[in-house]
Structures are given as structure tokens and as C-alpha cells.
Image: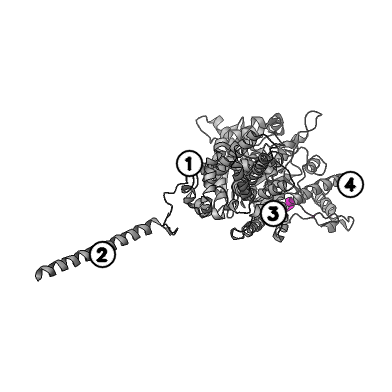
């Protein structure tokens, strides 16, 4: 660490060293060189055709006069997909330097977000990408399938010059289809690629911490193409902006930078701008030099002149690229400031995957708390226990609730603002984890809300992240199919350990208690409060029929049972009309609710005739003593009893026959 507490190197430096030490750069460039050889052969064949028209050369996919070749190469530990275009001039690219709005690029709408609704991509790159859609779609499915398989093979996506731009777009296209927690995300390595998009495009990519480590742009100091769009033909500043990690190099050394401001300053400075007349660079020699040394900053070369180790490392890195020119103090200060900013943001970046397992531990504590608060049916339940806070165990709950809420608020906020495919703001792992959190923790927030004497939680107190978690779950196809299917047999069997599915159930209970007391005091319109109570009845009975409430609500000390006792008194009044004949009144009045925790169909059969029980075709039968008898055992018992009765009758007949014969034999 330096004196400011910053790590001396960034994630980009580790990525660059990995690429150098594992031969990724060498293998990528070798595969690119093979494709460039094929393209050169293609042009040679075209020349031959001019002389011999009957000869038909090989064809390539092309945009205008720029042929493109794509191929996959298999290596021992990874596969490489390489993109190469025919040699282009700076003049050709300058003609296509315009930017295309994301509004006209539906393939990349997933990068749009609430805070970043539009961005722009280079016209030449996106046009060429669109011309390759059919072939790229097949390749994309192949890479995604490999990443999702158990024996996945890492993919390297690479390209040179304009081919590097296509490689970057293709990598983004793949990343959108992959779970960020996958360990085998593709790595994109470009060589001498022109800048691809504007600042909004860079910001859209930077929102994903995992995506930032999937791109490495290798730029030689003499290569003019990476800085081409930084020199606009007009006096207006360039709209282009670099993204992710840049490895600036020469035969004498290399340095890594991630801050887009740093890269832009260096691409236009005398340090990187070497041979201004160079049209293209062969990266083979510079890669060979890099393989002989890892990219590290040997600060001993400064002879102790710089006390700030991070600043010294940046200075040494720049001097290793261009040893002839002096590096100005102002440039060094700017770069250090920008790079330190990137490192701090990386350190502070929120990565939900790293903390999800930790959150499961905290949630497990709350599940234990729920069980303890039941007290074998004698307790008030965890909602009322937390609300009243009379036990020692209640004091530590708030700590875990706060930690869980902070985590899930950030997860939901990030998911809501980040680029996403429509309809899937959260991957399944987080969506169902967030649902468990919401169903357990939101009742605690409701308890805290009403404990302070407030009212109308649903409209005035509910957090936005709860609303979004609920909406995303309701929109999920799996949840919709479950709603249509109704309660399953497994759900009936697990009622006792279930949680109430509507996380706002207790808010409805509190409002129903308030309505009862308003009716009791006469402080509100009888008709409006009566309507609310009737609606609440229907709501509760609907949940019960679908087995969507926890048995905790029927604990005698719970707020629900408190409401029920108050409601029973109100039902005796004439103003309630025929409400006392409702399904819920029958269900609660004859006490079939006591069978609810057992998942027994009797809880419906002993209630009102209007209450429809869940499917009980496979449910166990019960004897009059309440002993559980399965259909198969019932059949066996019936057979045994029939056999016993038959034997008794046979013996009786034999006895009668014996007496009859004995009588006449005299």
C-alpha cells in the first residue's frame, strides 16, 4: 500500500500479466496472423481472377469493400475466436467515424438503463457487426452453451484493428446472455483497435464490475488506429471514449491503465505517439518482448527520487514505454489521480455474489428466531414478539435485519439501474433469494412501523425495493405457472414450516384491527370500515384456501387472533348484516383452523359448505379416532375384517349342521 492506503496496482495490471504469462497474447496474435494470411491470399486470388476470369476465388463476408474472416482455433486450455478484416487505411475509417445511436441498434438495447438511456457506437463497427449476424448468432449460442456446461471451456475473443471492434461487440453480446457468477466468462483481447463508442457507452459497460475484467486492449505506441478518432476533423472535442483495460506497450516495456481519462491523455501525448506515419503495427515482436518480462514497475530505477510508491510505479511504467521523451509532472499527476479513482471505485464496488452466502447465514438466524418465537404453539409468533420486544432474544434481531436490508436494497437498486434484458431484472438465484428475504424481513419492518403508532403502511411506509422484488417475482414465468396450478400436495405437507407468502399480510391485519376499533368507537363511517373488514375476510380466506399463510397466524397471542376476537364482538351487531355467515367465520368459528398446520383437508370439510378444499384426491383418510390411515392400509384392513367375518359365519353354519345331524341321529 502507498501512504494514501491505495493498493499499488489495479485489477487491469493483474489481467495484463495473466494474458502475458499464460501465452494468451501470443496465441491470439498467432491465430490473427493465420487469418490475415488467408485474407492476403484471398486478395491475391482476386488479382489472379482479373487475369483469368474463369477462376473463382474463395469468398468472404464483406461490408462494402472490406472482407471479414472469422474462425475458431482450439488450444489445450482454451478456444480462440478470431476476427480479421482486410487491411484498411486511416482514410477509410475516417469516412465511417460517425456514431450511431443505440436507438437504432436493437441488438444492444440491453446496455440501456434508467440512468443511461442512450449511447452511441462507431458506424463502421456496428454496420460490419450487423452484416455478420447470422454467423455470429451461431457462435454466440456455442459459447453460451459451453459456459453453462459442467465441463466448460474458456473462450478468448480476439481481433486486430477493425476486427478488434467486432470482437468487443461480440463479447458484449455474449456477456449479456451469461450469469455474472459464471467462472468461465469470455475474455476479449484486441490489438490496435479503434475506439468503439462514446462516454455513455463506456459508462454502460463500467456498471458491471465483472464485465470490466473481460476486456484487454493492447496498443503499440506507434499504432495510429487506436488514437484515430481522438483527432476530429473539426474543432469540437472528440465524442469517443475508451473503456476497460488498456495495455500500452513498446519493445522496451509496457504499462496498464484503466481510467478512460488516463488512456485519452496518453493516446494523444508524445509518450505514446511514436511514428505518426505508421499505418499498422505487427505486434509479434512486442509480444515476444513482453513475454520476457512481466509487467511490473521497478521503482528502484528512480533511485529513491519519488516517495509515493504508486506515483513512482506509474512514472516507471511510462518511461518503460517511451525512453526518449521526458514525462511531465502535470501529466503524471493527472494520470495518478484518475487511476487512483478507478482503484477506489473497484474497492468500493458492490459485488452481490461475494456476500450472498453470508446473507444466507443471517437469514438462517431469523428463521431460528421464527421457530423460537412459536414456543411450541404457546408463543405470540415472531411478528408480535419483535413488535413487543419483551424478550432478550428480540434485541439482536434488529442488527441482522439491518444488514440484510442494506444488502438487498443495494442489490435491487443496482439491478434496477443496470442494463438488463426486459423482464429479467434479477437472475433466478437472486430473485428467489430476495423473495425469501422479503417474506421474512418485511413483516419485521411492518412491526416496527405500527409499533410507532403509524398507519397505512402499504401507501406510506413500504420500501421501494420490496415493491420491486414482489413485482419481479410476479412477472417471473415460473411463478405464474405456480399460481395457475394451485396448492400442491407437497405444499400441504409442509404448511407447518412455511412462511406467509404475502409479505404485507401483517400490514393488512393491523389495518383490520384499526377498522374494528374505529367501528367500536364510532369514529369513522360504518359503511367504509365494514367494507374494509369484509374485503379483509375475503383476502384471508383466499390465502388460507391456497395454503399461503403460515400457521403462526393462528397462535392465540398473535395479532391476527387478537383481530379475530375483536371482530367476533363486532359481528354480533346488526350493522354487520349477514357477515357472520361468511366462509372465514365458519372456518374460524368451528375451529377447523386448528388442523391447518397439519395440512389436513378436514380444515375445509368441517367449515362452511362454500369453502372449497384443495385437491384431496390423494390425501390420507382418517378414522373416527383421528388416526391417520392411508388408502392402501385401509383396503388391507377391510379385507382382513371381511375374511374374519366369513370365517365366523362358516363356523356358525358348521355348528348348526352338527347340531341338526346330532338331533336326527337319535
Q: CA distance from mark 2 to mark 1?
A: 46 Å
Residue 155 is covered by the magenta coloring: no
Left or right position of 405 against 554: right
Question: The C terminus lies in which quarter of the figure?
Answer: bottom left
Sooner in the amino-acid sequence: mark 3 or mark 2: 3
The structure's colour scheme is one colour
Q: Which residue is mark 4?
A: 329
Q: Which residues are magenta?
A: 4-21
Disc 1: which residue:
610
Please check the rendered image and state whether residue 15 is part of the magenta-colored stretch, yes or no. Answer: yes
Mark 3, secondary structure of its residue? helix
- Rounded to the nearest angstrom, the CA distance separating label 3 from label 2 is 64 Å
Q: Which residue is mark 2?
A: 648
- Image quarter in which the N terminus is found: bottom right
| Earlier residue among tags 3 and 1 | 3
Question: What's the mark number on residue 581?
Answer: none
For numbered disc 2, what is the local secondary structure?
helix
Q: Is residue 463 left or right of residue 543?
A: right
- The Cα–Cα distance between marks 4 and 1, rounded to whole angstroms, is 85 Å
Please state the horizontal and vertical placement of residue 452, each as a whole percent of the image.
75, 47
Q: In the visual, does 392 lie left or right of 471?
A: right
Name the residue: 12% across, 69% down: 663
- Local packing at callout 3 (Cα closer than 10 Å; few below 14, some 14-19, many 20+) is many
List the residue tagged with mark 3.
386
How far apart marks 2 and 4 lie (CA) works out to: 113 Å
Amino acid at each position: 500500500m502507498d501512504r494514501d492506503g491505495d493498493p499499488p496496482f489495479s485489477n487491469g495490471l493483474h489481467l495484463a500479466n495473466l494474458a502475458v504469462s499464460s501465452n494468451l497474447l501470443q496465441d491470439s496474435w498467432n491465430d490473427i496472423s493465420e487469418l490475415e494470411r488467408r485474407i492476403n491470399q484471398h486478395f491475391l486470388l482476386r488479382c489472379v481472377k482479373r487475369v483469368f476470369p474463369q477462376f473463382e476465388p474463395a469468398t468472404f463476408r464483406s461490408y462494402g469493400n472490406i472482407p471479414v474472416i472469422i474462425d475458431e482455433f482450439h488450444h489445450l486450455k482454451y478456444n480462440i475466436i478470431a476476427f480479421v478484416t482486410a487491411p484498411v487505411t486511416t482514410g477509410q475509417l475516417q469516412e465511417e467515424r460517425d456514431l450511431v445511436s443505440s436507438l437504432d441498434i436493437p441488438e444492444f438495447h440491453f446496455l440501456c438503463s434508467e440512468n443511461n438511456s442512450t449511447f452511441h457506437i462507431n458506424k463502421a463497427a456496428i454496420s460490419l457487426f450487423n452484416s455478420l449476424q447470422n454467423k455470429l448468432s451461431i457462435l454466440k449460442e456455442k459459447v453460451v452453451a459451453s459456459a453453462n456446461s459442467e465441463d466448460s471451456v474458456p473462450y478468448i475473443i480476439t481481433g486486430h484493428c477493425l476486427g478488434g471492434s467486432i470482437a468487443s461487440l461480440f463479447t458484449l453480446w455474449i456477456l449479456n446472455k451469461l450469469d455474472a457468477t459464471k467462472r468461465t466468462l469470455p475474455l476479449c483481447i484486441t490489438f490496435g483497435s479503434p475506439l468503439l463508442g462514446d462516454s455513455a457507452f463506456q459508462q454502460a459497460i463500467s456498471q458491471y464490475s465483472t464485465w470490466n475484467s473481460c476486456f484487454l486492449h493492447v496498443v503499440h505506441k506507434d499504432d495510429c488506429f487506436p488514437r484515430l478518432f481522438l483527432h476530429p476533423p473539426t474543432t469540437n472535442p472528440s465524442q469517443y471514449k475508451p473503456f476497460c483495460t488498456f495495455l500500452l506497450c513498446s519493445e522496451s516495456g509496457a504499462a496498464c491503465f484503466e481510467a478512460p481519462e488516463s488512456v485519452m491523455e496518453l493516446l494523444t501525448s508524445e509518450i505514446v505517439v511514436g511514428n505518426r506515419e505508421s499505418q499498422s503495427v505487427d505486434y509479434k515482436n512486442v509480444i515476444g518482448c513482453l513475454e520476457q518480462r512481466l509487467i511490473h514497475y521497478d521503482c528502484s530505477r528512480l533511485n529513491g527520487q519519488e516517495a509515493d510508491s504508486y506515483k513512482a510505479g506509474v512514472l516507471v511504467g511510462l518511461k518503460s514505454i517511451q525512453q526518449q521523451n521526458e514525462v511531465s509532472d502535470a501529466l503524471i499527476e493527472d494520470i495518478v489521480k484518475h487511476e487512483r479513482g478507478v482503484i477506489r471505485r473497484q474497492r468500493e464496488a458492490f459485488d452481490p455474489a461475494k456476500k450472498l452466502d453470508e446473507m444466507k447465514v443471517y437469514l438462517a438466524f431469523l428463521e431460528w428466531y421464527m421457530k423460537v418465537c412459536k414456543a411450541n404453539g404457546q408463543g405470540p409468533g415472531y411478528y408480535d414478539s419483535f413488535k413487543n420486544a419483551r424478550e432478550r432474544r428480540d434485541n439482536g434481531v434488529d442488527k441482522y435485519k439491518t444488514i440484510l436490508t442494506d444488502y438487498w436494497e443495494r442489490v435491487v437498486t443496482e439491478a434496477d439501474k443496470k442494463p438488463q434484458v426486459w423482464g429479467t431484472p434479477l437472475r433466478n438465484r437472486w430473485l428467489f433469494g430476495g423473495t425469501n428475504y422479503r417474506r421474512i424481513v418485511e413483516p419485521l419492518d411492518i412491526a416496527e412501523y405500527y409499533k410507532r403508532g403509524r398507519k397505512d403502511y402499504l401507501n406510506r411506509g413500504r420500501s421501494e425495493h420490496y415493491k420491486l422484488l414482489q413485482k419481479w417475482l410476479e412477472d417471473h414465468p415460473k411463478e405464474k405457472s405456480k399460481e395457475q396450478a394451485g396448492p400442491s400436495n407437497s405444499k400441504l405437507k409442509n404448511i407447518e414450516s412455511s412462511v406467509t407468502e404475502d409479505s404485507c399480510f401483517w400490514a393488512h391485519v393491523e389495518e383490520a384491527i384499526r377498522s374494528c376499533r374505529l367501528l367500536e368507537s364510532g369514529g369513522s363511517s360504518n359503511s367504509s370500515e365494514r367494507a374494509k373488514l369484509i374485503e379483509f375476510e375475503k383476502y384471508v380466506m383466499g390465502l388460507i384456501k391456497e395454503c399461503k399463510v403460515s400457521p403462526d397466524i393462528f397462535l392465540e397471542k398473535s395479532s391476527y387472533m387478537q383481530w379475530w376476537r375483536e371482530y367476533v364482538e363486532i359481528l354480533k351487531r346488526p350493522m354487520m348484516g349477514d357477515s357472520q355467515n361468511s366462509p372465514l367465520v365458519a372456518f374460524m368459528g368451528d375451529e377447523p383452523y386448528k388442523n391447518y398446520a397439519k395440512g389436513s383437508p378436514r380444515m375445509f370439510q368441517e367449515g362452511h359448505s362454500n369453502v372449497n378444499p384443495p385437491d384431496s384426491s390423494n390425501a390420507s383418510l382418517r378414522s373416527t379416532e383421528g388416526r391417520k390411515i392411508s388408502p392402501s392400509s385401509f383396503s388391507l384392513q377391510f379385507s382382513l375384517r371381511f375374511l374374519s367375518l366369513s370365517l365366523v359365519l362358516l363356523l356358525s353354519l358348521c355348528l348348526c349342521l352338527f347340531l341338526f345331524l346330532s338331533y336326527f341321529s337319535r
